[in-house]
Image: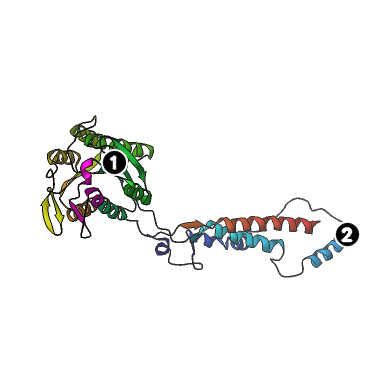
Amino acid sequence: MSLAAAMPWETWPELQLVWPWWLLALPLPLLALWLLPAVRSHAAALRFPHAARLSEVAKLGGRGRPGRGPGLLLWLAWALLCVAAARPQQLGEPVQPPQAGRDLMLALDLSGSMQEPDMSLGGRPVDRLTAAKAVLADFLDRRAGDRVGLLVFGRRAYALAPLTLDRESVRQQLQDSVVGLAGQETAIGDAIGLAVKRLRERSDGAGEPQDRVLILLTDGVNTAGLLDPRKAAELARDSDVRVHTVAFGGDGVMSVFGFQLPMPGGGDEIDEATLRAISEATGGRFFRARDTEQLAGIYDEIDRLEPVERPGPTLRPRIERYAWPLAAALVLAVLSLLLAGWRRQ
């Protein structure tokens, strides 16, 4: 519930009192003067031979309206103390909380088979890596609020971009990736193991672990690396990393002037059973994409499965302003004491 809803009154725009009942204390000094009896002294009075002259001086010094001089300053100081006790607050400029997403690692296969030109993009034939880059770049545009990292794998797995909110740097590393950068073979298990390590390191250093997701795209079978893919899946499961696997590749045909012709060597084998087992073991999903359109649809589906947490409603911070009337009250009280002392002198 907002402060404005809780306190419908306002002293003036943008300034509100949290405890307005303290203003009821404003007339307390007057009530004390009116209701409390005067203090009577039973001590012997001091007799002074020039009492008549002092009486005239007192009359001259007492001219004017009551409450002027030190008394007026003390009244103002009391009023400011009551205002400070009422705790004035001012609403600051609107602030929108930052988006809070998940830790998302992308793993891209750069083995030799990714250069097969059996995909179509914008009506022209392209290789698998070019098609995957286009789809991943569009996917990155929708992940505002996520910490995204990028790793590539071939014979070995390498992290190109750490988990970061700077999606533009991840996109640049993605565009600079080329087939064979990590070797010609396919180390799926090592890729999963490296992704889990990076995701776990990021959570350990940030206190509360974030929702951790790995999206792995490959077009082949695990043929290299030290870690078996199924063992890597167990490691991911134990580290609460959800793995979505995407098997990407055509059926061994290429389009030439609108005609589908078989490619030399036929289509590449994809170990769909292992990829499916990895996803099922970690609570993720397995997808099969045979063309660019299917691949784009898969990343749209992943975007729905792993939604970005949108920012909350716009908030206006409350700025405490009681220090101003409190300081002014102290200044007036000191001035009143100094003025009273000067008059006595």
Q: Quadrant of residue 138?
A: bottom left
Three-letter residue code for mark 1:
Val
Residue 117 lies in the magenta-colored region: yes
Q: Which residue is mark 2?
A: 50
Work out whether residue 72 can be spotted: yes
Question: Residue 152 shows which numbered tag?
Answer: 1
Question: Residue 223 shows which numbered tag?
Answer: none
Q: Quadrant of residue 285?
A: top left
Per the image, label 1 sits on a secondary structure element best described as strand
Per the image, label 2 sits on a secondary structure element best described as loop
**Residue 160 x/y as whole percent:** 34, 42
Taking depth in this image into account, of 197 and 34 the one nearest to the observer is 197
Classed neighbour count for the residue bearing mark 2: other residues with Cα under 10 Å, few (<14), some (14–19), many (≥20): few
What's drawn in magenta, residue-wise? 111-132
* Mark 2 → mark 1, Cα distance in angstroms: 106 Å
**Residue 174 x/y as whole percent:** 32, 48
Would residue 209 be found to the left or right of residue 3 on screen? Answer: left
Three-letter residue code for mark 2:
His
